Image: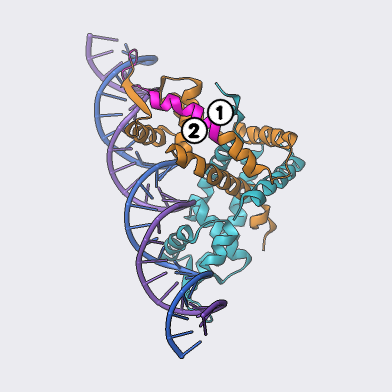
Chain colours: A orange, B cyan, C purple, D blue
DNA sequence: ATAATTTATATCGCAAGCGATATAATAGAA
DNA sequence: TTCTATTATATCGCTTGCGATATAAATTAT
């Protein structure tokens, strides 16, 4: 048995598990809003800056456009956002929040931070721990992205 | 704009991105072995302890059995493992490695650790950083699991 | 300007994940 | 023992995520 191949020695398995578990922790609040976690990510991108082409959203989320295109199509069907062809570049589809999509920001703000705080209150990590975690994860992301 | 809803302040988005990027980094080696990343996780579980019921594999990977069942069915079709009904408990399906599945451990050992080392060599994190990362992630996982 | 290349979306196919539900086998209660 | 509840798998339906490919628009090269 090679030590390197033990599950408990894999940083990747920890990331994979932690990511899935945190997504699961978000699910009840997101279900109340009628969206999924990746849809919530798209909303966060658009709340920061509305009217972005599919490509910019994909780059921001480190996703491929063949993931984001169907994602925003589903969100359009839900009435959360709209798409229209770009003026300068006709290849682009500019994604814009509808009034519904915009109004979801306040609801998310009321629901999510407190609920996630409660959910993680049993976790012994301190602010500095999350800060450190964020820094290390950013290094890994920077190294592997593109 | 609420600070709490900014993408850059989300630990969950970092976990989600880092997890996907690391999985992507594994992909070339796993493709050479003819498997996917979740299939590799199942193999690691079985290399540590062969002949386990679906349920034990699922619990070890923090996955639901409705994810693991189709996963091992696909791996059975690939000739990597076999399934047979449990002796004591007839509801169980005991999953066992075939010779092919067992022999993949050496190939994985030759391919993966060095390649991943190379891939992460550009990352400025030290052994202690990964150690710390692992501890913090374990706390998050422990808090959120079940 | 015309041709070749690149870029922005989109579509297709397949493997995960997971909620909901079904089924058979086991365990526990009356 | 017989009825009920729990447990182990499995199936279904839907959303992701992504490699491969297609198409149209824009850019670059000749």
The residue lying toward the viewer, choosing from B45 and A130, is A130
Q: Label for residue A41?
A: 2
Could you tell me which residue is drawn at 49 percent across and 67 percent down? B81
The residue lying toward the viewer, choosing from B96 and B9, is B9
Q: Is residue A79 above or below residue B92?
A: above
Give the magenta part as a residue range.
A87-111
Could you tell me which residue is drawn at 49 percent across and 27 percent down? A105
| Quadrant of residue A88 within the rendered picture | top left
Q: Is residue A21 above or below residue B87?
A: above
Number of numbered discs: 2
Read off the residue under disc 1: B5
To which chain does the residue with label 2 belong? Answer: A
Neighbours of disc 1 within 10 Å: few (<14), some (14-19), many (20+): many
The kind of secondary structure element at disc 2 is helix
The residue lying toward the viewer, choosing from B117 and C4, is B117
Q: Based on the picture, tell me whether residue A97 belongs to the magenta stretch.
A: yes
Specify whether D11 is left or right of B25.
left
Could you tell me which residue is drawn at 48 percent across and 39 percent down? A30
| Quadrant of residue C11 within the rendered picture | top left
The kind of secondary structure element at disc 1 is helix
Q: Where does the C terminus of chain B fall, quadrant-wise?
A: bottom right
Q: Based on the picture, tell me whether residue B77 belongs to the magenta stretch.
A: no
* Residue A6 picture location, percent across and down: 65, 58
Specify whether A146 is left or right of B49.
left
Could you tell me which residue is drawn at 65 percent across and 33 percent down? A139
* Residue A115 picture location, percent across and down: 59, 39
The Cα–Cα distance between marks 2 and 1, rounded to whole angstroms, is 10 Å
């Amino acid at each position: 048995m090679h030590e390197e191949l033990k599950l408990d020695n894999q940083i990747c398995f920890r990331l994979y598990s932690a990511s899935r578990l945190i997504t699961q922790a978000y699910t009840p609040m997101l279900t109340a809003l009628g969206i999924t976690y990746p849809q919530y990510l798209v909303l966060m991108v658009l709340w920061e800056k509305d009217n972005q082409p599919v490509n910019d959203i994909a780059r921001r989320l480190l996703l491929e456009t063949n993931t984001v295109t169907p994602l925003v199509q589903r969100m359009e069907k839900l009435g959360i956002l709209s798409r229209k062809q770009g003026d300068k570049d006709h290849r682009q589809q500019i994604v814009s929040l509808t009034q519904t999509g915009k109004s979801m920001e306040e609801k998310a703000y009321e629901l999510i931070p407190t609920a996630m705080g409660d959910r993680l209150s049993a976790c012994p990590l301190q602010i500095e721990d999350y800060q450190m975690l964020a820094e290390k994860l950013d290094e890994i992301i920077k190294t592997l992205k593109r």
